[in-house]
Image (tube, helix red, strand yellow):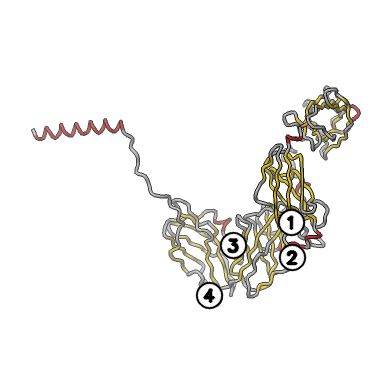
């Protein structure tokens, strides 16, 4: 009986457990707080800051499992080596194998950046580095500064900053740097553990990453004079990045050109037809700009006498002027538009003739209405220049130009007069404020020159971090300082 009762009790427990398992959700136990602590270096052999360093192998031990993230691109060795060390991670250990023969009496810095991370949460060790010397002492001089793109006033990150011992101008195009660093997210850079001496300083942003200035479209920055390091560190050695060539004038090869050539020879293929369209937003024309017309094929000739622009509801003809862009596909119609007024542009089908000797299939009529003044915003910017800046830059003789930038394009620009710049009829939107320090007073930004005579730094643009929001029928007063 006792044995039978046990079987019966076990059966009831099994049935009950099955019933309750269908009624309740099984929730796994919750974990603790997320690990945000990076790996900790427990020991390294040979020791960091070792003197008379001769080892070909360095072993780092950490308190947890580690991995390497893009070590080839992130690792910097100064002075530079011909061959990059081989670095591998296994469990809690990272091993670095040095392939080159190190120079005598030299301090070497192996900078890993944030390439060392823990395996679980991928927390990086920031600015992890290993420093040793093959001589009797460690070099300890530093150079620091900031990189700014001259044309935009923006800082740039991951830009190569390079020091050379040879001082001829062409060294940046012919040799690898002796010391090499990279700019951070805020544009700052820093060289550590430098030896005393005289150096030439450059910054270079390039695509091929060969650390050599070989293309005029690459961004370069250079110090005006040689860098002399003796017993003191150098701070605020800032560099302005610029491209010597105007990249907007350099045409890239057409990848489809080879494929398009056989199509031209296809006599049975129909010619593309000529059409024209107007660039209008909601059928409205801006008060401050021309009416933009776009043709599908470049225009060889245009008889403007066969075009008529009319104004108001009486269709009163009004005179206009026009011009083509360099591609002869975009036509600008210039007229002093009256606000809130209807217009109509009639283009006869024989007015344009394209490069294929075609004309429009029929006359084109573009009807639109001009915007009203209360559709726009306005702004007043007050500029203050400190006395120290005036003295350093002879600011009384400089010209300052305000630039309003939207979607990385300069939309409005104007000269500062007596510390004030005013502008009306601005399209609503969010704008960035930039200030061009126009040293030669020609009203535009001038790029620098390195390979040329005379060498010159680019003109500088100051970018202000706070954006302004312009609203329709509203004014904004902004104060900026330099």
Where residue 433 appears, as percent x and y from the top left, is 70, 49
Residue 296 makes an appearance in the image = no
Ranked by sequence position, the earlier of labels 2 and 1 is 2
Of 28 and 264, which appears nearest the observer? 28
Residue at mark 1: 460
Task: Identify the residue shown where x is 48% and y is 54%.
Answer: 123
Comes first in the chain, label 2 or label 4: 4
Q: CA distance from mark 2 to mark 4?
A: 37 Å
Where does label 2 land, which residue? 224
Residue 317 visible (yes or no): yes
Q: Disc 2, disc 4: CB below 8 Å?
A: no
Label 1: element kind: loop
In this view, the residue farthest toward the left is 1
The crowd level at tag 1 (other Cα within 10 Å; few <14, some 14-19, many 20+) is many
Q: Is residue 208 left or right of residue 416?
A: left
Looking at the rendered structure, the secondary structure element under dot 3 is loop
Placement of 290 over or under 315, stated as above or below: below
In the figure, residue 14 lies in which quadrant?
top left
Count neighbours of disc 3 (C-alpha within 10 A) and say few if under 14, some if 14 to 19, many if 20 or more. few
- Closer to the eye: label 2 or 1: 1
**Label 4 Cα neighbours within 10 Å, binned few <14 / some 14-19 / many ≥20:** some
* Disc number placed over residue 52 in the picture, else none: 4
Q: Earlier in the sequence, mark 2 or mark 3?
A: 3
Q: CA distance from mark 3 to mark 1?
A: 38 Å
Question: Alpha carbon of mark 2 to alpha carbon of mark 1: how far?
Answer: 15 Å
Report how far apart the C-alphas of labels 3 and 4 lie in the structure.
Answer: 21 Å
Residue receiving disc 3? 83
């Amino acid at each position: 009986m006792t044995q039978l009762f046990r079987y019966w009790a076990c059966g009831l427990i099994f049935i009950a457990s099955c019933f309750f398992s269908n009624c309740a959700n099984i929730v796994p136990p919750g974990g603790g707080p997320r690990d945000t602590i990076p790996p900790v270096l427990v020991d390294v052999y040979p020791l960091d800051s070792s003197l008379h360093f001769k080892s070909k192998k360095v072993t780092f031990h950490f308190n947890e499992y580690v991995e390497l993230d893009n070590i080839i691109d992130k690792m910097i060795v100064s002075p530079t080596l011909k061959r990059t060390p081989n670095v591998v991670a296994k469990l809690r250990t990272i091993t670095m194998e040095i392939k080159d023969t190190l120079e005598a009496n030299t301090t070497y810095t192996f900078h890993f950046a944030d390439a060392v991370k823990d395996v679980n949460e991928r927390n990086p060790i920031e600015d992890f580095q290993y420093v040793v010397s093959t001589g009797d002492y460690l070099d300890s001089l530093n150079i620091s500064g900031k990189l700014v793109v001259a044309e935009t006033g923006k800082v740039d990150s991951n830009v190569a900053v390079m020091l050379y011992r040879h001082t001829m101008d062409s060294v940046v195009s012919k040799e690898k740097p002796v010391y090499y660093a990279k700019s951070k997210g805020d544009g700052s850079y820093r060289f550590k553990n430098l030896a005393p001496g005289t150096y030439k300083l450059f910054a270079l942003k390039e695509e091929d990453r060969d650390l050599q200035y070989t293309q005029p479209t690459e961004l370069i920055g250079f110090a005006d004079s040689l860098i002399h390091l003796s017993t003191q560190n150098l701070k605020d050695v800032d560099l302005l990045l610029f491209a010597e060539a105007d990249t907007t004038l350099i045409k890239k090869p057409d990848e489809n050109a080879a494929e398009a050539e056989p199509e031209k020879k296809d006599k049975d293929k129909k010619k593309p037809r000529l059409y024209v369209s107007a660039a209008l937003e909601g059928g409205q024309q801006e008060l401050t700009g021309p009416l933009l017309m776009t043709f599908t094929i470049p225009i060889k000739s245009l008889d403007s006498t066969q075009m008529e622009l009319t104004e108001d509801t009486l269709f009163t003809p009004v005179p206009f002027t026009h011009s083509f862009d360099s591609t002869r596909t975009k036509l600008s119609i210039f007229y002093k538009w009256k606000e809130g007024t209807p217009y109509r542009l009639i283009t006869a089908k024989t007015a344009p003739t394209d490069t294929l000797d075609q004309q429009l299939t029929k006359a084109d009529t573009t009807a639109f209405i001009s915007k009203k003044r209360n559709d726009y915003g306005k702004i007043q910017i007050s500029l203050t220049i400190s006395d120290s800046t005036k003295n350093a830059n002879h600011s009384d003789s400089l010209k300052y130009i305000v630039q309003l930038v939207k979607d990385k394009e300069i939309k409005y620009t104007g000269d500062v007069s007596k510390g004030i710049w005013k502008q009306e009829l601005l399209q609503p939107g969010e704008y960035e404020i930039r200030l061009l320090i126009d040293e030669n007073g020609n009203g535009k930004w001038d790029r620098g020159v390195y390979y040329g005579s005379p060498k010159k730094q680019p003109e500088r643009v100051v970018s202000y971090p706070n954006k302004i929001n312009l609203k329709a029928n509203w004014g904004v007063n902004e104060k900026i300082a330099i």
